[in-house]
Image (spheres, grey):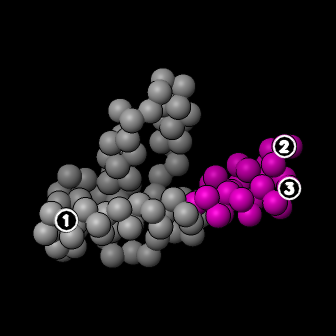
Amino acid sequence: MGYNKPVKLSSKKILRNLRSGNLVRNKKIINEYNQVWRKASSNVISKVHITLAQRNISKDTLRIILRAISDDNEQKLCQVLLKGFEKEMSHIENLTWKSLYSIKYPN
C-alpha cells in the first residue's frame, strides 16, 4: 500500500522453509499455505479500503502516512505493521509471530 507495489503472492523464504521440513514437503500443504496467504492478503487490503472509506481518507494520504512512519523504508514499514498486531495475540501466538520478524519484505 505504501509503495504502489503489487501484493506478493507468497513469501519465498516461508515457502523454502515449508519445503525443507519433513512434515510439509507435501504439495497439498504448499497449496493450502498459498490459499491462506492470498486470503489473508485480500482480507487486509479489503479492510484497509473499508476503513479509508469510513474515515474519508484518501489512499494517497495513507501512502504518505505509511512512508512517514517507516522513514520511507519498505522493510521498516513491514516491521511496524507486524508489531502493530502484537497486542491482539496471546503470549504463545506472539512468540511464533515474532519469530517471523526476520523475514523482511520482499522475501
Query: How many circles with numbers are drawn on the protein?
Result: 3
Residue contact between numbered discs 2 and 1, judged by CB atoms under 8 Å = no
Q: Is residue 64 above or below residue 92?
A: below
* Mark with earlier residue (2, 1): 2
x, y (%) of residue 84? 33, 42
Q: Quadrant of residue 28?
A: bottom right
Q: CA distance from mark 1 to mark 3?
A: 42 Å
Identity of the residue drawn at 61% across and 58% down: 36
Q: Classify mark 2: residues with Cα within 10 Å, few (<14), some (14-19) or many (20+).
A: few
- Circle on res. 26: 3
Which element type, helix, strand or loop, lies under badge 2? Answer: loop
- Give the residue at mark 1: 54
Identity of the residue drawn at 19% across and 65% down: 54
Q: Residue furthest top?
A: 91
Identity of the residue drawn at 35% across and 32% down: 87
- What amino acid does circle 2 point to? Leu
Classified by dominant secondary structure, the portion drawn in magenta counts as: helix
Q: CA distance from mark 2 to mark 1?
A: 44 Å
x, y (%) of residue 80? 32, 46
- What amino acid does circle 3 point to? Asn
* Mark with earlier residue (1, 3): 3
x, y (%) of residue 31? 74, 63
- Circle on res. 23: 2
What's the magenta region?
13-37
x, y (%) of residue 79? 37, 47
Q: Assign the N terminus to one quadrant of the image.
A: bottom left
Please say whether residue 61 is one of the residues in the magenta stretch.
no
Identity of the residue drawn at 15% across and 68% down: 57
Q: Nearer the viewer, mark 2 or mark 1?
A: 1
Q: Nearer the viewer, mark 1 or mark 3?
A: 1
